[in-house]
């Protein structure tokens, strides 16, 4: 217990001591500091990031009209907070992320463990792709956890980041970032989607999904989808757009910045800006 308390205290002190990132002042809370920094800089970048995040995350909340402490049997009250960051690869874009304080709640009855694809599986897939001349594409799911249903019974009273809805009682209906079961909920939802598309989870690595396919010359092979939390990695021969369009009926992809081809990832200008072609690992560039 003493060791744990020492570690937590050091982490907290380090977090609060950090005031800048890449030379840009980063707020710790919205109420005064975010607005104050924007006023100092003569812009609205931090508050714009807050408004964008709260607009995206609003889908996770359902307004409750009543006394939650007395009427919501089996529900637990939680709190939330905003985490601020600066995205170096996106022209120093200001980023705000609303997270539930899941560390303050008890362990849920549902499973919270969530797996990710292993490095060895990725390396094997790249070898298979090179041998079979498969197209390799990657994509990132936007607000991934919020696409899945929340498995925990929790409610929240809106804070100042909710704007005009501050003080409103909400039921958390989606797998909000920070909840203990959020990652597992999203993985189960994505697994259901891939299974509906005909992909089956590998026995060797549950986050490698494969589907039998046939080349134009009649040769049989497998198409692959790899999952690392909200990152999708595809190895296909036939045009992958059809599969990605199917996935996008349930998920939205983040736009990806162009990257240097010698670092192993090259943005393909012929594809939508939500996709990138992974080329460097295969062609040796």
Image (cartoon, rainbow, N blue to C red):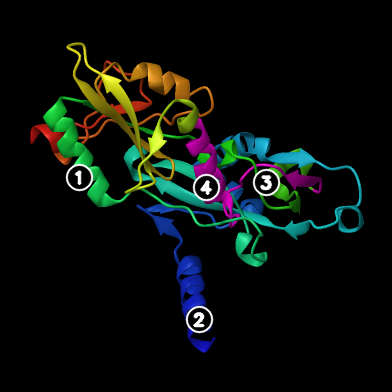
Q: Residues within 10 Å of mark 4 (few under 14, many from 20)?
A: few
Quadrant of the drawing holding the C terminus = top left
Depth check, mark 3 against mark 4: the one in front is 3
Measured along the vertical axis of the image, is residue 61 above or below residue 8?
Answer: above
Locate residue 67 relative to residue 87 in the image: left or right: right
Depth check, mark 1 against mark 3: the one in front is 1
- Which residue is under mark 1? 123
- Which residue is under mark 4? 40
Depth check, mark 1 against mark 2: the one in front is 1
Q: Which mark is residue 4?
A: 2
Q: In the image shown, does 55 or 283 lie closer to the viewer?
A: 283
Measured Cα–Cα span from mark 1 to mark 2 = 37 Å
Asked whether disc 3 touches disc 2, contact meaning CB atoms under 8 Å apart, the reply is: no
Q: Which residue range is magenta in the image?
A: 167-193
Asked if residue 122 is among those painted magenta in the image, a careful observer would answer no
Which x, y percent locates residue 215?
22, 16
User: Helix, strand or loop at disc 3?
Assistant: helix
Measured Cα–Cα span from mark 2 to mark 4 = 39 Å
Measured Cα–Cα span from mark 1 to mark 4 = 48 Å
Q: Residues within 10 Å of mark 3 (few under 14, many from 20)?
A: many
Q: Which mark is residue 161?
A: 3
């Amino acid at each position: 217990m003493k060791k744990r308390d020492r570690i937590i205290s050091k982490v907290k002190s380090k977090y609060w001591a950090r005031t800048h990132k890449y030379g840009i002042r980063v707020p710790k809370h919205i109420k005064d500091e975010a607005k104050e920094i924007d006023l100092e800089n003569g812009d609205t970048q931090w508050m714009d990031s807050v408004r964008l995040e709260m607009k995206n995350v609003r889908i996770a909340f359902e307004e409750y009209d009543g006394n939650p402490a007395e009427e919501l049997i089996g529900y637990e009250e939680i709190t939330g907070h905003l985490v601020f960051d600066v995205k170096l690869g996106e022209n120093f874009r200001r980023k705000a992320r609303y997270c539930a304080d899941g560390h303050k709640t008890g362990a849920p009855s549902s499973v919270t463990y969530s797996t990710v694809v292993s490095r060895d599986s990725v390396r094997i897939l790249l070898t298979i792709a090179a041998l079979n001349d498969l197209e390799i594409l990657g994509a990132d799911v936007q607000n991934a956890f919020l696409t899945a249903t929340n498995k925990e019974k929790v409610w929240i009273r809106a804070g100042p980041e909710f704007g005009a809805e501050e003080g409103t009682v909400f039921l958390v209906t989606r797998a909000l970032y920070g909840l203990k079961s959020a990652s597992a909920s999203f993985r189960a939802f994505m697994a259901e989607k891939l299974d509906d598309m005909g992909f089956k989870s590998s026995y060797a690595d549950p986050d490698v999904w494969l589907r039998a396919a046939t080349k134009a010359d009649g040769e049989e092979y497998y198409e692959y989808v790899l999952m690392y939390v909200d990152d999708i990695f595809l190895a296909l021969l036939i045009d992958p757009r059809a599969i990605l369009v199917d996935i996008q009926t349930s998920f939205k992809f983040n736009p990806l910045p162009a990257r240097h081809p010698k670092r192993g990832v090259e943005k393909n200008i012929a594809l939508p800006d939500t996709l990138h072609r992974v080329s460097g690992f295969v062609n040796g560039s």
